[in-house]
Amino acid sequence: MLIQILKDIEDPRIERCKLHQLIDILIIAICAVISGAETWEEIEEFGKSKQEWLESILELTNGIPSSDTFRRVISRIKPAEFQEKFLKWIETIRENIDKEVIAIDGKTLRRSHNNKLGKTAIHIVSAWANSNKLVIGQVKTEEKSNEITAIPELLQILEIKGCIVTIDAMGCQKEIAKKIIEQEADYSLALKANHEKMYKEVEEYFQEQIKLNFEDKEIDYHQTIDKAHGRLESRKYWVTSDIDFLSQKKEWKNLASVVCVESSRTIADNTSIEFRYYISSLPADAKLLAYAVRSHWGVENSFVIILKC
């Protein structure tokens, strides 16, 4: 399927310079990067080590291309065209799962800076489909602060209908929430001090209600406990759709609930407690929102940056 989809990519070379077919170059490079290759030389080494298998699916009339060929050809391909085709392939292998968590997060690409040339490190904003264990889209930015503009661009190329989109505090923006709803998905957004007024309102509400044990308040509750290697972790989730106390409620598209998570970690005799807050378009379902929150935490270190070369 991947071969059929990529065959339509425009070859940037003139006819007399085509010692290797474009599809051969692309397939070898993709397989190599998925297998962990990080340089053009490593892509060539992968091709040579897997040549027998590659010859069963590719023509390879002139053998495995050199590292210089990989660099020269792939560097000239139109990035937008390649991304469109690659995401089309990803969608063919991705299983559609209702309430799939799509975690959007940014990572800085290792060794992508060049101080001598004044080049800053490349920052990649990625979308991870949790149940499928797939990166389903990526957008490059020059700075982490540019995530706010990169996220809508990434959402535009994704099929997220019926999914739950989770984003950290950087992406907790009204226009991003609106964009997610317009694409028929739901959101769970981390709330921090970058929305000072709203954060304070949510924090004060939950801290007061925890002390009062939520008397006369509609609340849904869920707790998880994990024990491993002398460590005890407890997470308590309180969710309410009683959000009339929010002064900016109407400014957030389809805002339906707010969430408080109390994370408690005990190692030996030392216990630390941390509170986190979220806003969501989902109903007050503590178990579902706990799943969304934990899915995002779990994949923050799981993103694979594709085509790092």
Image (cartoon, grey):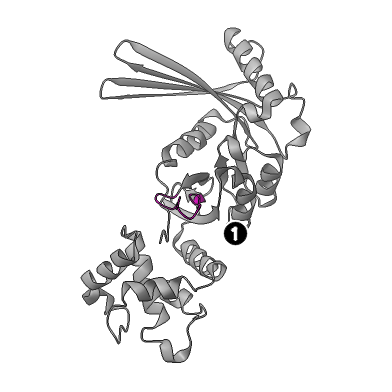
Residue type for callout 1: Ile
Query: Which secondary structure class fits the magenta region best?
Result: loop
Whether residue 1 is visible here, answered yes or no, is no
Could you say which is closer to the camera, residue 223 or residue 87?
A: 87
Q: Is residue 253 above or below residue 83?
A: above
Q: Is residue 196 above or below residue 131?
A: above
- Locate residue 209, reporting x and y percent: 62, 12
- Locate residue 251, reporting x and y percent: 77, 35
Q: Which residue is drawn at 65% across and 47% down?
A: 180
Query: Which quadrant of the figure contains the C terminus?
Result: bottom left
Residue 117 counted in the magenta span: yes
Residue 216 counted in the magenta span: no
Could you say which is closer to the camera, residue 305 or residue 258?
A: 305
Q: Residues within 10 Å of mark 1 (few under 14, many from 20)?
A: some
Query: Which quadrant of the figure contains the N terminus?
Result: bottom left
Q: Determine which residue is flagged by label 1.
A: 157
| Residue farthest bottom in this picture | 16
Q: Is residue 13 above or below residue 287?
A: below
- Locate residue 105, reporting x and y percent: 51, 44
- Locate residue 160, reporting x and y percent: 58, 53
| Residue farthest top in this picture | 212
Q: Which residue is drawn at 48% across and 66% down?
A: 86
Could you say which is closer to the camera, residue 226 or residue 85?
A: 85
Q: Residue at x 34, y 62 (%)?
A: 39
Q: In this view, does 250 lie to the left or right of 132?
A: right
* Residue 238 placement: quadrant: top right
Q: Residue at x 55, y 51 (%)?
A: 142
Whether residue 212 is visible here, answered yes or no, is yes
What are the residue bounds of the magenta stretch?
109-124
